[in-house]
Image: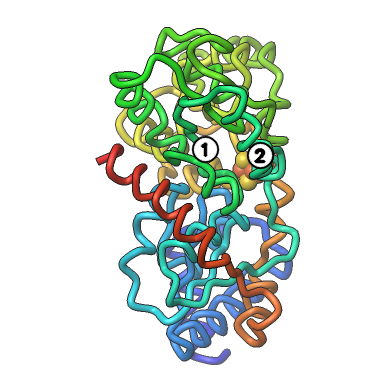
Amino acid sequence: MDAALDGEIKRLTALGLHRRCVEGGLARTAALTLEINRLKAEKNAVICAHVYQTPEIILGIGDLTGDSYKLAADCRTTAADSIIFCGVHFMAETAKILNPSKKVYVPSKNAGCSLSEAVTAADVRGLKAAHPGLPVVTYINTSAEVKAESDCIVTSANAEKILRRLYEKHDRLIFIPDRFMGANLAATLGKTPGKDIILWHGTCVVHEKFDPALIAVYRRRYPGLVALAHAECPAELISAVDFMGGTGDMMRYVAGTNAAAYLLVTECGFGELAALKFPEKNFIAMCRLCPYMKSITLGSVLALLKDPSPEEVTVPPGIAARAKTAIEKMFELAA
Ligand code: SF4
């Protein structure tokens, strides 16, 4: 066997990827990661990989990895000429807004997001007209045009903290587009939806469908189980679990505790990553695949590196400047 391929197989094995069942086996995966990492270095590109990607993307080729907040923060300091975003389109737009001089690419034409598609800039202008003077707080899962109409962006990692700070100055605010996350935040902060916090009707197609009744079933089957759910889940589900947060919060919770078993209620890639990071812990899968995130594969990343031109992400400068102000407000308030 080729020595470079043999070395790559050993590297992936040390990362635990030999335990994954992937098409073509580990040798096929290693051939792809080897070629991607070679081309990436040759083109001075950096790969951002969100935690909902597959472990072979996150661990095999990712340079910057994490949740939306961490990726947005970390990509600001990259010295690479281009950013390949293994995540969804709004994340790549955010990277472009924060790094206007760099070329940014997404290796899939289908990497959308149901939340991002649930609200338009015209919708936000309508909300502002209906509720004049209220600050617009916008989840990062939105288009650049929607961000440009907003006062402050939040992620699941910092939404509670930023809302607390904004409520020090405002009695009411608008939160878009995730109605479940908005309602969960309202419950945490003791606010009333429709009165203190104006919500929109967006939902995540992955997190809206988990069945709360199953949590009790899992608890009976696995004594000592701790259930963690993403803040995009409906309130009935959240009330049945032990911990609600973003994926970064969930990973820190798992790292800092020693439960008999963990039920991770979110996208499947996160559970796969957690199992690889903590092989000594017991994870129970109650997960769903995000079709947008999973439209990216090692093959599509390699195809992009060979011919990036069709997948470049652009944001009109006027939109980018206004969106950047709202994103920078997030970094300021989350600090
Ligand atoms: S998991 Fe939900 S919020 Fe995240 S990208 Fe997929 S559809 Fe959007």
Residue nearest the observer in this picture, 150 or 109: 150
Cβ of mark 2 under 8 A from ligand 1 = yes
Q: Crowdedness of circle 2 by 10 Å Cα count: few (<14), some, many (20+)?
A: many
Picture coordinates of residue 255, whole percent (x, y): 34, 36
Q: Looking at the image, can residue 104 be seen?
A: yes
Quarter of the image containing the N terminus?
bottom right
Q: Residue at x 49, y 27 (%)?
A: 262
Mark 1: which amino acid? Answer: Tyr
Residue nearest the observer in this picture, 95 or 214: 95
Q: Earlier in the sequence, mark 1 or mark 2?
A: 2
Q: CA distance from mark 1 to mark 2?
A: 9 Å
Determine whether 312 is above or below 71 in the image: below
Q: Please say which color scheme the image uses.
A: rainbow
Mark 2: which amino acid? Answer: Leu
Q: Residue at x 63, y 73 (%)?
A: 301
Determine whether 70 is above or below 133 in the image: below
Q: Is residue 42 left or right of residue 18?
A: left
Quarter of the image containing the C terminus?
top left
Q: Residue at x 47, y 78 (%)?
A: 82
Q: Residue at x 49, y 82 (%)?
A: 40
Q: Secondary structure at mark 1?
A: strand
Picture coordinates of residue 267, whole percent (x, y): 61, 40
Q: Which mark is residue 212?
A: none
Q: Are marks 1 and 2 in contact (CB under 8 Å)?
A: yes
Residue nearest the observer in this picture, 273 or 224: 273
Ligand 1 lies in quarter:
top right
Q: Which residue is mark 2?
A: 115
Picture coordinates of residue 173, whole percent (x, y): 47, 22
Q: Which residue is mark 1?
A: 139
Q: Looking at the image, can residue 59 be seen?
A: no
